[in-house]
Amino acid sequence: MNNDFPRILSLLRKERHISQKAAAADLGVAQALLSHYEKGKRECGLDFLVRVADYYGVTTDYLLGRSASTTGNLITENDIPDITSGQEKTRTGADISITMSKKLVVNSIDVIYSLIGKIGNSRFSLAVINMLNLTVYKVFRIVYRSNKGNTQNMFEIPDERACHYADAQIHIDEAEAASIIKNAGPDSPEISTVVIESEYPRQSAALLSLIKSSEAQIKKQISFK
């Protein structure tokens, strides 16, 4: 079994607020064995994999981490709504990749803004919005460097300092947001795969795909277990 299965197996149970004892009974295995499956200490057979898929109403592709969607669909450009300005798209390979990435980011940000609105804390909202704005600012300054003839007079902060200052402010805002969330009350919105796919049916594919692809990029760079 792959490394994704134990995590997803545990995630599905916890997102549905099912105790390990109850899930084990429903799936016809001992609780100790289910615990081993969830911790990745034991590998299950195909029969159990199919039972789990039926029990939670997901596909085996999702259980094995092959798809970011519980339906097992592989996300394509056409699956993600285009809520950007109606710019004409060229169809070279590079442009298709850029268009796909743009859809992932824009739809994901749409979900994030909705969620921070539900949290309803102005300090938290400001911290998260600052983090997003500063990230866009950093990327734009990097793109701006592509032509050495572009004058730095466009910016007040010198190029050699800007990204470092932006990083520092992002860390400050991240600490502020983390501190607020740590003390969040029970009225904060429940966020799970189930909730995201239910409340954001058009944008969920983008957000879940972005999460999966981002973690894949991170895992390439580090020894991850």
Image (cartoon, rainbow, N blue to C red):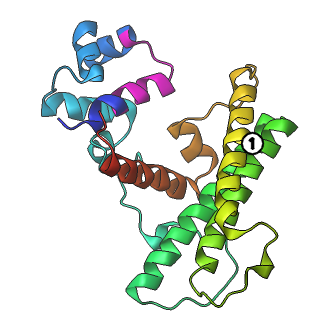
Type of secondary structure dominating the magenta stretch: helix
Name the quadrant of the C terminus.
top left
* Vertical placement of residue 34 versus 198, above or below: above
Q: Name the residue tied to disc 1.
A: 116
Pick whichever, 43 or 17, lies toward us.
43
The residue under the point 71% across, 43% down is 115
Is 9 left, or right, of 124 in this rendering?
left
**Residue interval drawn in magenta:** 8-20
Residue 98 magenta: no
Q: Give the farthest residue toward the right.
A: 122
| Circle 1: residue type | Ile
Pick whichever, 160 or 28, lies toward us.
160
> Looking at the picture, how far across and down is residue 152, in whole percent?
73, 79
The residue under the point 49% across, 76% down is 98
Task: Say whether residue 28 is visible.
Answer: no
Pick whichever, 65 or 173, lies toward us.
173
Q: In which quarter of the image is residue 142?
A: bottom right
Is 66 left, or right, of 149 in this rendering?
left
Residue 16 magenta: yes
Pick whichever, 152 or 134, lies toward us.
152
> Looking at the picture, how far across and down is residue 13, in whole percent?
42, 24
* Vertical placement of residue 31 versus 105, above or below: above
The residue under the point 77% across, 66% down is 157
Q: In which quarter of the image is residue 124?
A: top right
> Looking at the picture, how far across and down is residue 99, in whole percent?
52, 77
The residue under the point 67% across, 74% down is 84
Please rate how many residues cluster around mark 1, counting C-alpha atoms within 10 Å: few if below 14, some from 14 to 19, many from 20: some
Count of picture labels: 1
Name the quadrant of the N terminus.
top left
